[in-house]
Image (cartoon, helix red, strand yellow):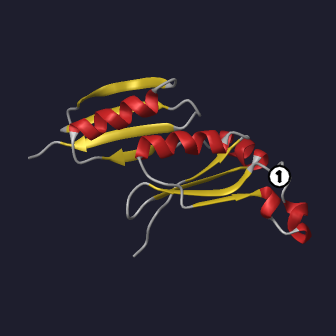
Amino acid sequence: MTTLNPYIYFNGNCEDAFSFYKSVFRNEITYIGRYKDVPKTDRQIFREADEKIMHISLPISTETILMGSDNTVAYEESIAYSNFSLILHTDSKAEADRLFNELSESGQVKVPMKMTFWNSYYGICIDKFGISWKITQEAKK
């Protein structure tokens, strides 16, 4: 089985972002590694401060893990290709609304949650860390 897991780069606020995502997705972080944990012989490839996040993992379902790190160079490069959104498929309108409301708090609502012509309950928001989210719940046929 192949899985796809998003990896998000942050410019020094990865820990804050994942604390937020932990509360939204109501799950526990399974791994957190800091740059200070990198062996000294490999430090030349890592430029971030010791306390910043080298890698973090937060499962959001049995198949999906949200991952990220503080990486200034990768973050700056990612701005040029930020032509994507993370999409969440839910089982209920209530869960879609909860995720949308929590993710959009202190962020931006781009498309409010509503029924669409393609028979989905759907909305788009950008969270307070600049990540674009699409939330959808397929209507029962």
Q: Position of residue 49 (x, y in %)?
A: 84, 48
Q: Position of residue 42 (x, y in %)?
A: 87, 68
In the displayed structure, does residue 3 sit left or right of residue 41? left
Residue at 79% across, 63% down: 37
Q: Quadrant of residue 81?
A: top right
Q: Position of residue 79 (x, y in %)?
A: 67, 39
- Identify the element where label 1 is drawn: loop
Which quarter of the rendered picture does the N terminus lie within?
Answer: bottom left
In the displayed structure, does residue 9 sit left or right of residue 34? left
Residue at 30% across, 33% down: 97
In this view, the residue in front, 124 or 94, is 94
Disc 1 marks a residue whose amino acid type is Asp
Q: Quadrant of residue 75?
A: top right
Give the labeled residue for mark 1.
50
Q: Please tell me whether residue 136 is drawn above or below residue 30 in the rendered image.
A: above
Residue at 54% across, 38% down: 131
Residue at 23% across, 48% down: 91
In this view, the residue in front, 28 or 74, is 28
Q: Please tell me whether residue 108 is drawn above or below residue 50 in the rendered image.
A: above
